[in-house]
Image: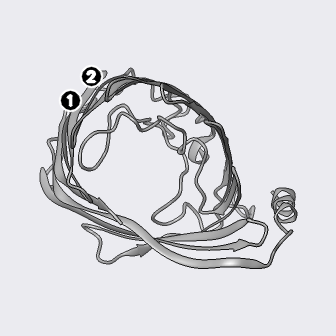
Amino acid sequence: MKKLLASTALIFAAGAAAAETGVTISGMGRFGLVYYSGNVAPTSDTRVDARLRFNIDATTETDSGVVFGGRIRMQWDDGATNAGLSAARLNVSYEGLRVEVGNANTAFDSAALLYNSEVGYVSSSAGNSRSSFYSFSTGALPLPDYMAIFASYSMNGFTGQVSYATPDQSGATVVNEETSIALSYETDMFAVSGAYVTDGAGIADNDVWFLGGAYKGLANTTIGLNYIEEGEDGVTPGVKLGTTIVAYAHYTMDAWTFKGYISNNDYVGNTTDTGFGIGADYDLGGATLAGGIQRDYAEETYVDFGVRFDF
């Protein structure tokens, strides 16, 4: 890791004089109602959901066009007594190349199409991966000495990503390191994506791989299919979370976008192997009114409805 950091610093050392510097704030907010039939007393089936997020980004650009920057996220969710700050992500980019360190993104979590089956106001899906893997953390890091490195390169519709994460780079504890890779290619007609992660979230033998494809050649319609070979559950060695297959479709008409999916997962602990969901988004021009209804592998019903906005 020391060699990689040193090499990265040398590559971008030229033209170190800052040409442009700035701090920007972006984010999102949402509020609405969420119902889940699987909640057990004293937890209520229905609750008011709310979230406010600020992404604080600082950037500076050198005379040669290299951009250095960093992000810290502030977020409040209903149920929390106060807003919390994330750990920092530092990044450097030049043309199609981007490198991140710290509380960085990871290749598997950033894989194109992985979350395309999501529906509803909160955006979720039974067709998402059930496995554990690292990602940019809005909350606390897994351990104080957690460190991730992420690199991506994009050119002419192709994107390649690779990441490495260790829960404790100090070496004080014996931990497993996560490594992941993702590749994708997109045109106006179709998109394909694949990703692989080994020892996801530091869990030994928690190896997950994903393949996805989407066709966009129909008028106002996208149809897609994802396949995920899930990893281990992290509780019982050798017990895997099954295989997840999900087919989904999006259809846009004026300000409306209608979404739906049907998924299958063959984990032995499921009540049923089939999940499904439908939802709709309505563009308010600056905000989105959205809702959805889903059934999960426990045969429980999830319903959400509310407003989302970005700034």
Locate residue 96, reporting x and y percent.
Answer: 69, 49
Question: Circle 1 — which element?
Answer: loop
Q: Residue at x 45, y 29 (%)?
A: 241
Q: Residue at x 55, y 69 (%)?
A: 71
Image colouring: one colour
Locate residue 285, reporting x and y percent.
Answer: 24, 56
Left or right: 61 in relation to 195:
right
| Amino acid at pointer 1 | Glu
Query: Where is 234 relative to 51, above or below?
Result: above
Residue 272 numbered mark, or none: 2
Locate residue 15, reporting x and y percent.
Answer: 83, 71
Left or right: 294 in relation to 249:
left
Q: Residue at x 74, y 65 (%)?
A: 66
Q: Is residue 56 in view from this perspective?
A: yes
Q: Residues within 10 Å of mark 2 (few under 14, many from 20)?
A: some
Discs 2, 1 touching: Cβ within 8 Å: yes
| Amino acid at pointer 2 | Thr
Q: Earlier in the sequence, mark 2 or mark 1?
A: 2
- The front one of 172 and 16 is 16
Left or right: 195 in relation to 284:
right
Question: How many numbered discs, if any?
Answer: 2
Residue 299 numbered mark, or none: 1
